[in-house]
Image: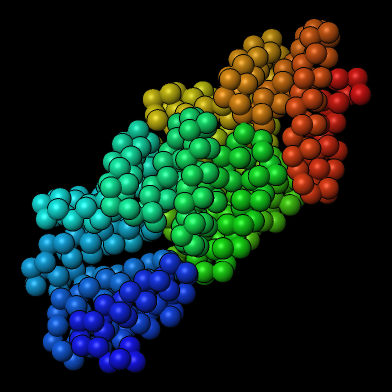
Amino acid sequence: MELKPGFTACCEALIGRGDVWMLLGEYERAREDFSAVRTLAREAGERRWEADVLDHLGHAYRQQDKIADALDHLEPALALSREVGDPSLTGRILNHVGFTYTNIARHKEAIHSHQEARRLLEDCRDLAGFAESLHGLGENARFLGNFGEAIRWLSESAEVCDRTGNRRLAGENLYMLAQSRHQRGDYAEAEVEAAHSMTTLAEIDDAWNSSFALVVAARIATTLGRFDKALEYAERGLSLARQVGVARSEVLNLQALSAVHRELEDHQGAWQIAREVVALARVGEAGAFQMSLILSSCALIEAALGQTAEAQAHIEEAHRSLRPEQAHAEYAHDLAHTEGRALLALRRPADAVAAATVLLARIGASDDLHWRLPTMLLLADATSARGDPVTAVQMYETTAEEAQAARRTPVLWRALAGQAESQCAVGQTEAAVASARRALELVNHLAAAAPDGRLRTTFLQSAKVQRVAGLAGN
């Protein structure tokens, strides 16, 4: 810049530097460079450059979940790009508009934007923009619970990224593929893709995307009972989110931490984090895209603590925040599972059985198989609480078999513990002791994966674990 280059070279240099600031999470500095280009473009009457830099400004605001500011720049950018007749620029802006709509759960509008962008960018052979369109279509399919479709779009985008060398989008595709496979119950593939994503994004110092990749890795680790890794990933993700000022990622990483505490029976600790998440999500637009999941997670913990009135209030609010297009996605399954647990806490086991039965049928007709095992466990727990230990024994056994095959240790130990209690209730003493001992062995394995001594002690001294220990003869 000290060499005082011409208009084009100056704009390219400022936008290039701004893009680097974006990658490093220095959004204010990025916007300073982009704003300087906007001033130059206006003074020179260069409408194409003005559209281009308005797009960059909008994207910089979206990265920090400043949705109104993002749209205030993206909408005029889109109009200008159409006026100057640049289909490649229009397609790129449409993609950024689509990503912004996704952030606030306006999925139909997002899909429309990405579809139009895809047509434009394919026609003008803009492979980089075309890969973003495919990515956007996959992202929205994932949010809508169409995980098979999401995997198809994201895999196509990943192939284009390989050809163009776009490692940032490649890393983003990988963690979204991992998320989709996690919800389908393909945990081994999900683990590999999440690890590849974290490595790729760390190598290019992409703090923004890394914070989201770490959330995905933490969720997968929690599902499989690798609590040490889950805590490590979520804490790193939280640190990155706060470092670059991305409230949405902060919310997600805190949720992941809360989930680990809940699995380790530290419901008080989980609740404290969950309350922080709810408060943070209500500020600005950080939690708009998945408020129902945030409220449902809080309600699940409250039900476990016996705070049934608070749980019911959060469940009702979660229903109000659930958008119609989310009715068949993981949002609805998560919320229905929480409702079932709340019914058990209210000592309404027959209603919990009915709710779990309906939910199992819905999951069977969907692509969201991740929720099958927690719902099977809910149904077994409710059947036991209703006073039918004979049927409960069979349900727990089936749940344990499926959990073992899926390597879902947290579900497996709970199913074995429930099986032991039901076997004891029907006089199958030896079988009850054997089931309890298997459960206790898994409990000790999970406790060893808790790096925090307080968490480990809380887990081992929890009422559920103590009942298992008693049945095992310890």
Q: Is residue 50 above or below residue 89?
A: below
**At which x and y percent is residue 19?**
36, 71
**At which x and y percent is residue 294?**
54, 51
Let me know if residue 289 appears in the view: yes
Q: Is residue 110 above or below residue 368?
A: below
Colour setup of the view: rainbow
- Please state if 124 lies on the left or on the right of 232 as rendered: left
**At which x and y percent is residue 384?**
69, 20
Let me know if residue 358 appears in the view: no
- Please state if 421 lies on the left or on the right of 348 as rendered: right
* 27 vs 205, nearest the viewer: 205
- Please state if 173 lies on the left or on the right of 213 as rendered: left
Q: Quadrant of residue 388?
A: top right
- Please state if 212 lies on the left or on the right of 5 as rendered: right
Identify the residue shown where x is 43% and y is 23%.
Answer: 364
Q: Residue furthest front?
A: 3
Q: Quadrant of the C terminus?
A: top right
Identify the residue shown where x is 23% and y is 61%.
Answer: 92
Q: Is residue 67 above or below residue 344?
A: below
Identify the residue shown where x is 42% and y is 45%.
Answer: 174
**At which x and y percent is residue 312?**
59, 46
Q: Quadrant of the N terminus?
A: bottom left
User: How many numbered dots are placed on residues in this image?
Assistant: 0
Q: Quadrant of residue 353?
A: top right
* 129 vs 441, nearest the viewer: 129
Identify the residue shown where x is 30% and y is 42%.
Answer: 159
